[in-house]
Image: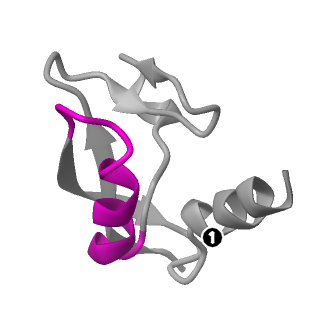
Amino acid sequence: MGTMVTRYRIEDEVGRVLTVEGFFSYEADDALQFRSEDEAYEEVSAFPGTTVERFERYSSFPDFFLSEAVSVQRSSA
């Protein structure tokens, strides 16, 4: 059983979203998602002119969040 979850993403001034690969894209489905607003604001500081946007999405796994996996991946690189 799924549920609606609140997530955060980083958008630039023309509406593109930050992706897992670190690029900006118009494909919202590719957006890097943050479970914590604070974590999103930490990341947004690396991209001047961008904002943190809140959105709701359906999730089968409400406790899973992509940003933790990406943070682990980035710190090991």
Helix, strand or loop at mark 1:
helix
Q: Would you say residue 44 sits in the magenta stretch?
A: yes
Q: Quadrant of residue 66?
A: bottom right
Asked whether 30 or 52 is in front, the reply is 52
| Left or right relative to 20: residue 16 | left
Of all residues, the one furthest to the right in this rendering is 76
Which color mode does the image show?
A: one colour
| Left or right relative to 72: residue 45 | left
Q: Quadrant of residue 69?
A: bottom right
Task: Look at the picture and state if 72 lies above or below 31.
Answer: below
Specify start and end residues of the magenta stretch as a single range.
Answer: 35-50
At 21% from the left and 36% from the top, the residue drawn is: 50
| Left or right relative to 43: residue 21 | right
In the rendered image, residue 42, in percent from the top left (x then y), is placed at 36, 64
Q: Residues within 10 Å of mark 1 (few under 14, many from 20)?
A: some
In the rendered image, residue 43, in percent from the top left (x then y), is placed at 40, 55
In the rendered image, residue 28, in percent from the top left (x then y), is placed at 38, 30
The residue that disc 1 covers is: 68
Q: Quadrant of residue 16?
A: top left
Asked whether 62 or 66 is in front, the reply is 66
In the rendered image, residue 36, in percent from the top left (x then y), is placed at 36, 76
Asked whether 58 or 55 is in front, the reply is 55
| Left or right relative to 54: residue 42 | right
Task: Look at the picture and state if 59 lies above or below 55.
Answer: below
Asked whether 3 or 37 is in front, the reply is 37
At 54% from the left and 80% from the top, the residue drawn is: 1
At 56% from the left and 32% from the top, the residue drawn is: 22
The three-letter code of the residue at mark 1 reads Glu
Q: Would you say residue 39 sits in the magenta stretch?
A: yes
